[in-house]
Image (spheres, helix red, strand yellow):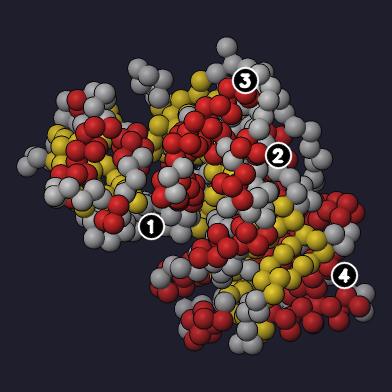
Amino acid sequence: MAKKIKYNEVVRIDSIRDMMDKAVAAMGDQTLFKYKKAGKVQEVGCKEFNDTIIYLGNALAKRGFAENCHIACVGANSYPWIVTYLSTLCGSNVFVPIDKDLPEKDLLNVVEHSESVVIFCDKSLVPLFTSDAKELARVKLVVCLDGDDAVPFESLLAEGKALSEKGYTAYTEKTTPDMDLKMLVYTSGTTGNSKGVMLSHHNIRSALNYGLMVEDVKVRCLSVLPYHHTYESVIGILVSIHKHNCICINESLRAVLPNIQLYKPVYIFVVPAFAELFYKRVWATLEEKGKAGLVRKMIKLSNGLRKIGIDLRRKFFKQIIDNFGGELRQIICGGAPVRPEIGEFFTNIGIDLENGYGITECSPLVSVNQGHDNDFASVGVVLPCLEINIDQKDENGNGEICVKGDVVMMGYFKDKAQTDEVLVDGWFHTGDLGNYTNGKLYITGRKKNLIVLDNGKNIYPEEIENYIYSIPYVKDAVVYSIKDENGAETDLCAEGFLDMDLLPADGRKPEEIFKADILALTKDLPSYKHIHKVVIRDTDFPKTTTKKIKRNDIKK
């Protein structure tokens, strides 16, 4: 029988503008953002930020972009990116975040397909968007986020400020109706071509209202993941503003660990690749210092004390916690299931790692674990605005996860055929496989990744990959089927990208070591799940910007 779910009380918002108004009333000049500029940390108060988004909105409105215009933003994580984002959300235009790392042809295609008329972009991309007027016939304005090319961002703000001082109100007079399109997000998924996911104003504010009923965040975060992904832009940025928390902007992947020390975040949103990196780095350091055995003993002692109500984790494991800034208490991990032992380890040392599940088409949150009821094997409690159905269950209760409710997208932009394929009678078919047990959602794999052997056995490659990832020298791994001359899937292959410096120096070939270690870890699995062949890569796997492996790009 499922436990009764305890929901948090949430101050509900009627719109994104309402969210900002409530934030300004509560915070005033209190710091909302921190970021580095010319090597120095800048701090921006909530009221100052709100004034800035109004300036930008006024400037665009005066130039003729006041209502129902598609505003594209292509650039690195930055404060100007967030200003552009919130200014668009609080007004009556549609925001189109685009992955800056797309090939140039794809960038042009997305801008054209999205019907964007204004582009905000980094200096490096200005020539691309200003040199091909024929291909981008709809584009009327290009704004440079980080320089003096095209129309500089700062000059646009100056225009808007001057208008505000004269009492100009065209921007603040209108906002997008609740059920209308507010964000157009192009997926950069691991398979297939990108699609324009249409999220309404209602979808986005529902993700905030209902998401915070399930999980809470406090004080200060480090904003790490790419902003064009809804995981960071909605669940990271908007949730933090809604909670009146300080957002510290991480400017690059290389800066993550130094910035954790600099900003000392209390919570951070990550994808499994980051959690895996943190986990392996901690254990590698402990092994190097000869303290791994001691930490394992201390974890057992600490867990025993916790059972009788004594929690000394933050004291026992202070040295490890100090490596994460000293104040980190919560890691929220989404994008894909994280290995249970990683969640268990961080929670054991006093940093709660809570796994969640989301997909862009659901704005993007579907479920998340709660701090007081954290199940490391699950992706947690489903948002109270959603219904869940497991379609075409197998004998173990696993099937395709389908959801219906307030956060489910409007559909795919200009693509009725694909919309009709995934949205059936209001139910969104996620393409992910799992089960719903005792009030918790469990992910077992991706429908497109499912392997069906010629003996009829179904295999979720992600299950076996989790075993492989526990091997210290494995950086990345993928399991797929071996096909015979007739195309039948007969056996399994594990392909890995390894840290050769960590391989045992015992005279064996790397392939022998890799295969032997996999077989040792999976010996208790049914024989049809055993690995028969291994492949070692010279380079890392092709990946998306959230570090998901592009399985279709792997040459088998």
Disc 4, disc 1: CB below 8 Å? no
The residue carrying mark 2 is 216
The quadrant of the picture occupied by the N terminus is top right
**Mark found first going from the N terminus, 4 or 1:** 4
Q: Does 37 sit left or right of 471 as displayed?
A: right
Q: Which amino acid type is marked by label 3?
A: Lys
Secondary element type, mark 2? loop
Label 4 belongs to which residue?
169
Which residue appears at 72% of the width and 81% of the height?
A: 154
- Location of residue 162 in the rendering, given as x and y in whole percent from the top left corner: 86, 81
Three-letter amino acid code at disc 4?
Answer: Thr
Mark 2 or 1: the one toward you: 2
N-term-proximal mark, 2 vs 4: 4
Horizontal side of 365 relative to 296 (left or right) equals right
Residue on which the image places disc 3: 307
Residue 493 appears in the picture as rendered: no
Q: Nearer the viewer, residue 397 or 252?
A: 252
437 w.r.t. 85: above or below: above
Q: Nearer the viewer, mark 2 or mark 3?
A: 3
Q: CA distance from mark 2 to mark 4?
A: 35 Å
Nearer the observer, disc 2 or disc 4?
Answer: 2
Horizontally, residue 319 falls left or right of residue 62, namely left
Using the numbered discs, state the Cα–Cα distance from disc 2 to disc 3 in whole angstroms: 24 Å
Circle nearer the N terminus (2, 1): 2
Mark 2 Cα shell of 10 Å, populated few (<14), some (14-19), many (≥20): some
Q: Residues within 10 Å of mark 4 (few under 14, many from 20)?
A: some
**Can you name the residue that lies furthest to the top here?**
1
